[in-house]
Amino acid sequence: MTGGAPATAPPVEGAAPIEIHDDFVRREFRRASIWLGCIAAVALVVLLVQPLLIIFAGLVFAALLDGGVRLLGRVLPIGRGWRLLIVVLLTIAFLFGTFYLTGVQVAEQFSQLRSTLEVQANRAAGWLSAQGMMPGASDVNGIVRQALGSVGRITSWVGTAFGALTSLFMMMVIGLFVAMDPRVYQRGLEWMVPRANRPEFAIVLARMARTLRRLLAGRLLGMVAEGVLTWLALMAGGVPMAMILGILTGLLAFIPNIGAFISGALMIAVGFSAGTSVGFWAIGTYLIVQTFDGYVLLPIVAKKTVDLPPALTLGMQIMASALFGIMGLALADPFTAMLKAGLERSAERNEEKAGGEEE
């Protein structure tokens, strides 16, 4: 080649090795990316399950505060911030007042309840061992140690008092901040979805929030009614520790089905510790209270709140407790109610599309 401008190489024809021009390869690559993204999201959820549960519990607490603020707004036409302050102060006053007035008695009854349950459990274990239906005491202790040692890593953090108190504090802080101005966080969630889907996403969020508020209102009403009725009935029958059993029954009523079974076992065990007649009174109290709660109170509340099928609720509780421990068990109902609200909205949207196509 002689002097003059340097010759340039001719352009390369065709696609580069890293380019994907085939439509079939593009579709498959997109599908593979979606599956890999789903797997990564599931793995991230598993790794962050503890903080995610705390955040969700904070949202449930925020819905509880928001429900109180909305209810107070019907009688007090003042700003939202002042109503939230009143609700928080009333909640704190109720908790501190309850612990102050009944603290000594509850502490004594808790100690007595623990001793009574230990005695009753030893009696039951001894009777079952004598009948050949249960291993000996040493074998039972070994089984208990193995069961406690097999608790998964996911729920081990609940066992420490520091972890439980820290989680409770963080849950309350998150709930308080969200309840101060829920619209800010709702807008933040809406910004995370495509613009075309934001109106529908806003409707789903509003439905879920309303469903959660109704569920919690019904739960609180049921907890108060069940706790007070149990306390009065046990006190009338002379069952020891009627107050603490009523408080425990009311608190455990937040977890339907399983909570009622646990509270019933506690009151029956305490009742038989005071005599056969008192034990049968405790059984009758449990049956009457649960019958009234299941066939009278809950159907009335369900018409105004959320109607969750019992089998679905129990199934979600079993799965949530197996995966996430006691906190998952407590949050199973709110999660199921929100999921049900989202699915109902999806079904309504599909019906609207089908109706529009027919027209």
Image (tube, rainbow, N blue to C red):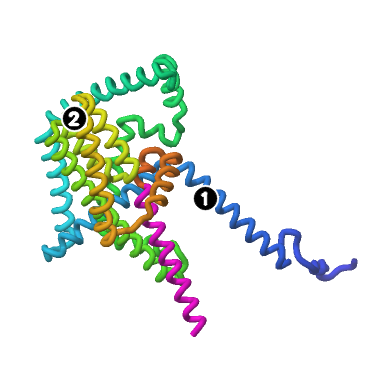
Amino acid type of the residue that numbered disc 2 sits on in the rendered structure: Val
The residue most toward the left is: 101
For residue 113, side relative to residue 355 (left or right): left
Find the magenta span and give its range: 332-359
Q: Quadrant of the N terminus?
A: bottom right
Contact check, label 2 and label 1, Cβ < 8 Å: no
Q: Position of residue 239 (x, y in %)?
A: 16, 31
* Secondary element at tag 1: helix
Residue at the spot x=26%, y=28% of the render? Answer: 269
**Residue 6 visible in the current orientation:** no
**Residue 115 visible in the current orientation:** yes
Marker disc for residue 41: 1
Along the line of sight, the residue nearer the viewer: 268 or 25 = 268
Q: Position of residue 214 (x, y in %)?
A: 27, 58
Marker disc for residue 230: none
Q: Position of residue 291 (x, y in %)?
A: 26, 47
Q: Measured along the vertical axis of the image, is residue 241 above or below residue 206?
A: above
Q: Earlier in the sequence, mark 2 or mark 1?
A: 1
Residue at the spot x=40%, y=59% of the render? Answer: 340
349 inside magenta stretch: yes
